[in-house]
Amino acid sequence: MRQLVRYPTFPQPFQRLHGMTVWLRADVEAWIAEHRPPRPIDADPK
């Protein structure tokens, strides 16, 4: 998480609590869907 939150496009936290930060799951999943590189297609299915 420490690496991800450094990206300027990563969503802002929903709330900061004593000792932890909380993000909304939907926000994080939307960010991942937009920014994750596509997985390579396995050319040799087994």
Image: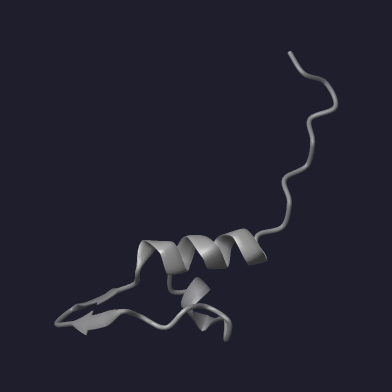
Q: x, y percentage for residue 23?
A: 34, 72
Tell whether 29 sits left or right of 14: right
Please determine whether, in this image, residue 23 is positioned above or below residue 45: below
Q: Give the quarter of the image for residue 18.
A: bottom left
- The colour style of the image is one colour
Q: For this rendering, which residue is in front, 4 or 35?
A: 35
Q: Give the quarter of the image for residue 7.
A: bottom right
| Residue that sits furthest to the top in the current view | 46
User: Quick one: quadrant of the C terminus?
Assistant: top right
Q: Residue at 38% across / 62% down in the picture?
A: 25
Tell whether 2 sits left or right of 39: left
Please determine whether, in this image, residue 31 is positioned above or below residue 40: below
Q: x, y percentage for residue 45?
A: 77, 18
| Residue that sits furthest to the left in the current view | 18
Q: Residue at 51% across / 72% down in the picture?
A: 4
Q: x, y percentage for residue 9?
A: 58, 82
Q: How many marks?
A: 0
Q: Is residue 3 visible?
A: no
Q: Give the quarter of the image for residue 8.
A: bottom right
User: Quick one: quadrant of the N terminus?
Assistant: bottom left
Q: Residue at 56% across / 62% down in the picture?
A: 32
Q: Residue at 24% across / 83% down in the picture?
A: 16
| Residue that sits furthest to the right in the current view | 43
Tell whether 37 sits left or right of 27: right
Q: Is residue 26 visible?
A: yes
